[in-house]
């Protein structure tokens, strides 16, 4: 258990560091461009979206430390869980929002996030002594999947936009992670509902999926940094 916690911390810190370094490299490379090009809204939005990814990874790191503390001390607090999963995804959703051209898809992101918050309220998870179960994890992962899917359709329609490949990588990573997480949550929920004890295999698979998800971010940023250095 401790090894998994340490891996989370290391991977997330790498993601934060590489995202900050990539933003600096991006600003250096754009400094060579004419001022008119540097001030284009698309370039400003892209730099903002990188900052949003950094904020997202930082919030995930804080969230992971909080949940780890509660897990180590054998504490269950539905309020903390709900607050974490209410606010942590917002920067990532904002990343998709910025890079989406269709207005109805942007509104769709807001509606899907509202559905997530409504599900937490309906399940009573904003009460301190409530216990989160696999069903709410399935709803959370489904929201991630649907938002990433909406963004993917928008990206494919506007494939000639700046930094298309970078945005596509981020979207596909979230899409694959949320799909696998939804499948694992469904299997886990079904297993518990049938009266079986908690399966260690599901627990390990879920953590491996999350670790791969977080590892993807520093890998993407490192690849982009290498591209900028070659220019």
Image (spheres, helix red, strand yellow):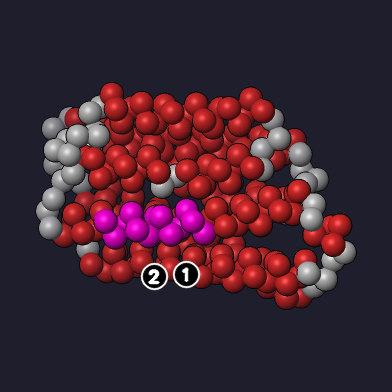
Q: Which mark is residue 179?
A: none
Q: Is residue 208 left or right of residue 77?
A: right
Q: Is residue 190 left or right of residue 29?
A: left
Residue 78 in the image: above or below residue 2 = above
Magenta-highlighted residues: 54-66
Q: Give the percent coordinates (x, y) of residue 63.
A: 33, 54
The residue at 58%/46% (across/down) is 95
Q: Quadrant of the N terminus?
A: bottom left
| Location of mark 1 (residue) | 14
Q: Is residue 129 visible?
A: yes
Residue 2 in the image: above or below residue 125 = below
The residue at 13%/41% (across/down) is 197
Q: Residues within 10 Å of mark 2 (few under 14, many from 20)?
A: few
| Location of mark 2 (residue) | 10
What secondary structure is the magenta-colored segment mainly?
helix
What secondary structure is found at the residue carrying circle 2?
Answer: helix
Q: Nearer the viewer, residue 102 or 7?
A: 102
The residue at 76%/39% (across/down) is 158
């Amino acid at each position: 258990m401790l090894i998994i916690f340490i891996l989370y911390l290391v991977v997330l810190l790498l993601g934060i560091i590489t995202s900050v370094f990539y933003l600096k490299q991006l600003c250096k490379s754009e400094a060579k461009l004419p001022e008119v090009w540097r001030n284009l809204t698309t370039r400003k939005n892209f730099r903002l979206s990188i900052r949003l990814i950094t904020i997202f990874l930082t919030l995930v790191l804080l969230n992971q430390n909080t949940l780890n503390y509660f897990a180590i001390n054998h504490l269950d607090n539905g309020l903390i869980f709900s607050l974490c999963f209410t606010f942590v995804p917002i920067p990532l959703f904002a990343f998709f929002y910025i890079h989406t051209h269709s207005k109805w898809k942007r509104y769709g992101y807001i509606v899907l996030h509202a559905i997530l918050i409504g599900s937490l309220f309906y399940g009573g998870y904003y009460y301190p002594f409530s216990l989160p179960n696999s069903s709410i994890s399935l709803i959370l992962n489904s929201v991630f999947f649907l938002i990433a899917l909406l963004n993917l359709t928008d990206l494919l329609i506007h494939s000639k936009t700046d930094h298309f490949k970078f945005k596509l990588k981020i979207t596909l990573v979230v899409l694959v992670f949320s799909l696998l997480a939804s499948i694992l949550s469904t299997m886990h929920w079904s297993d518990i509902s049938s009266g079986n004890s908690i399966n260690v295999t599901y627990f390990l698979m879920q953590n491996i999926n999350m670790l791969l998800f977080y590892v993807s971010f520093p890998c993407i940023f490192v690849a982009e940094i290498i591209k900028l250095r070659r220019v």
